[in-house]
Image: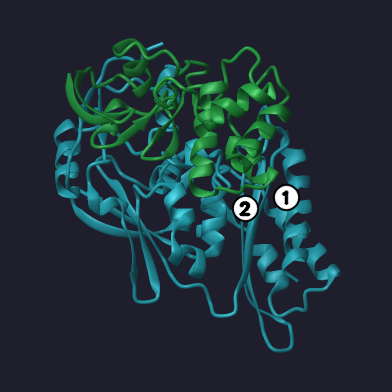
Chain colours: A cyan, B green
């Protein structure tokens, strides 16, 4: 079955992309890897007359170190992200989460920017990037702006991008020194599915093994990926005992506002969050 | 129409093709290379898997413009002068083919694995083949075939 006929623009620079989108005034849709948009079009859920593909903008697929931070172009594929040396050594949490998305044949095509702009609540990279306190770099007709990733996800499949704006990349600050981190996801069906819930955590223990810094983020736990701030407050300054970890896991489950869908009910998701936050924290303790 | 230059199974191609076609539309309907199968059309089943610059990709999800300047390998490009390659031989010997619909995707995914990891573990093979659905074999013989090809001459 063919996709519906559409026109395709292939700008070669970011300003050109912005200009094309402005000229089309909301009639066009941006396509990155297409692993979400193409099936959505095939199902007839969207029927754009024109696509603006960003694959010919070289600046959007680079990964560059800038001081202690890492600038990742929005068109970076998930496979190149998870294989990248700097990512593996300095930001292993992000590399691990990117590697867990779907299957090799999807990761070769799907992009980090596309994943974030699709704004799937159960995104794998999003919780990792929330823990790393990443910033979204956005360009549009009125210039560039920076949005903390926590403010980028505004609702169910909704982002802070205004019409005519594109995500150009993500800036990921260095993790605090001595940080330990991990990502766990639970798939009730096959492992290549999107997760029912995903849990990312990053923490730093001081010399006396008290929690000096902690960040926990959840996918599939609310209409958007979220930070589990209540669980973080419970852990802050504490020793990672089993009791404290249980308390944090309860808090994360209580803070969650999960949806019910064919994959699982809200109650099942909440219970799953409690279990996997506990398991992840135990693995890091 | 858009014009796309790319390499297909080692040969340079230039083709004019509607912009809304996918790589799968081009291979099957434009070029009559029917080894690459149309299964789900949503990137889930793996039967349309081809290699693009050596990495497995779903032809049903790739707009044809994405092939520009890249090297595509389909199952038709695997054999050597009409002789089956190492993986194809191993699949035949192990009984890893029943109906055959998933086989092109399995072969290409396995080839991408062996190119970067010549001595995979069973788990590596299973991870590399994840997302290629087989409803006949139960996967065991496919995994055995890939391991045999890796260890073979």
> Does label 1 lie on the same chain as label 2?
yes
Residue B115 coordinates in the image, percent (x, y)? 48, 44
For disc 2, the chain is: A
Residue A257 coordinates in the image, percent (x, y)? 65, 45
What residue does disc 2 label? A218
Instruction: Give the class, few, some or many, for how many residues have Cα within 10 Å of label 2's Cα (few <14, many ≥20).
Output: many
Q: Which residue corresponds to the image point at 17% horizontal and 40% vertical from the top-left?
A: A11
- Residue B44 shows in this picture: no
- Marks 2 and 1 close (CB-CB < 8 Å): yes
List the single residue furthest toward the right. Answer: A243
Q: Quadrant of residue A201?
A: bottom right
Residue A117 coordinates in the image, percent (x, y)? 41, 43
List the single residue furthest toward the front. Answer: B153
Q: Which residue corresponds to the image point at 74% horizontal and 45% vertical from the top-left?
A: A270
Which of the image's four quarters has the C terminus of chain A?
bottom right
A254 or B126, which is in the foreground?
A: B126
For disc 1, the chain is: A
């Amino acid at each position: 079955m063919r996709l519906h006929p559409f026109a395709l623009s292939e700008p070669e620079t970011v300003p050109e992309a912005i200009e094309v989108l402005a000229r089309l005034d909301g009639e066009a849709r941006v396509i990155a890897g297409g692993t979400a948009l193409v099936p959505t079009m095939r199902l007839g859920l969207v029927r754009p007359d024109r696509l603006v593909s960003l694959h010919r903008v070289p600046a959007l697929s680079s990964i560059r170190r800038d001081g202690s931070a890492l600038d990742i172009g929005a068109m970076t594929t998930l496979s190149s992200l998870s294989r990248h040396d700097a990512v593996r050594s300095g930001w292993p949490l992000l590399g691990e989460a990117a590697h867990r998305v779907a299957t090799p044949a999807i990761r070769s095509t799907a992009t980090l920017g596309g994943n974030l702009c699709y704004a799937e609540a159960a995104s794998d990279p999003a919780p990792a990037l929330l823990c790393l306190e990443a910033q979204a770099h956005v360009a549009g007709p009125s210039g560039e702006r920076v949005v903390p990733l926590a403010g980028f996800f505004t609702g169910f499949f909704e982002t802070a991008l205004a019409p005519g704006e594109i995500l150009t990349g993500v800036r990921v600050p260095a993790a605090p020194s001595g940080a330990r981190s991990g990502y766990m996801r639970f798939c009730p069906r096959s492992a290549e599915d999107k997760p029912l819930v995903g849990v990312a955590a990053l923490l730093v223990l001081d010399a006396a093994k008290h929690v000096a810094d902690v960040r926990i983020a959840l996918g599939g736990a609310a209409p958007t990926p979220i930070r589990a701030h209540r669980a973080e407050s419970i852990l802050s300054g504490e020793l990672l005992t089993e009791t404290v970890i249980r308390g944090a896991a309860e808090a994360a489950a209580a803070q969650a506002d999960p949806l019910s869908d064919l994959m699982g009910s809200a109650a099942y998701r909440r219970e799953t969050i409690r279990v996997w936050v506990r398991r992840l924290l135990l693995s890091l303790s | 129409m858009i014009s796309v230059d790319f390499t297909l199974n080692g040969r340079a191609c230039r083709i004019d093709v509607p912009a809304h076609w996918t790589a799968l539309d081009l291979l099957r309907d434009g070029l009559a290379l029917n080894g690459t199968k149309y299964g789900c059309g949503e990137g889930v089943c793996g039967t349309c898997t081809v290699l693009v610059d050596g990495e497995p990709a779903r032809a049903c999800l790739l707009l044809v413009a994405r092939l520009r300047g890249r090297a595509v390998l389909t199952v038709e490009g695997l054999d050597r002068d009409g002789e089956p390659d190492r993986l194809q031989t191993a699949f035949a010997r192990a009984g890893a083919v029943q109906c055959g619909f998933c086989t092109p995707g399995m072969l290409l995914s396995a080839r991408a694995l062996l190119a970067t990891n010549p001595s995979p573990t069973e788990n590596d093979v299973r991870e590399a083949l994840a997302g290629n659905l087989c409803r006949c074999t139960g996967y065991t013989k496919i995994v055995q075939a890939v391991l045999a090809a890796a260890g073979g001459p």
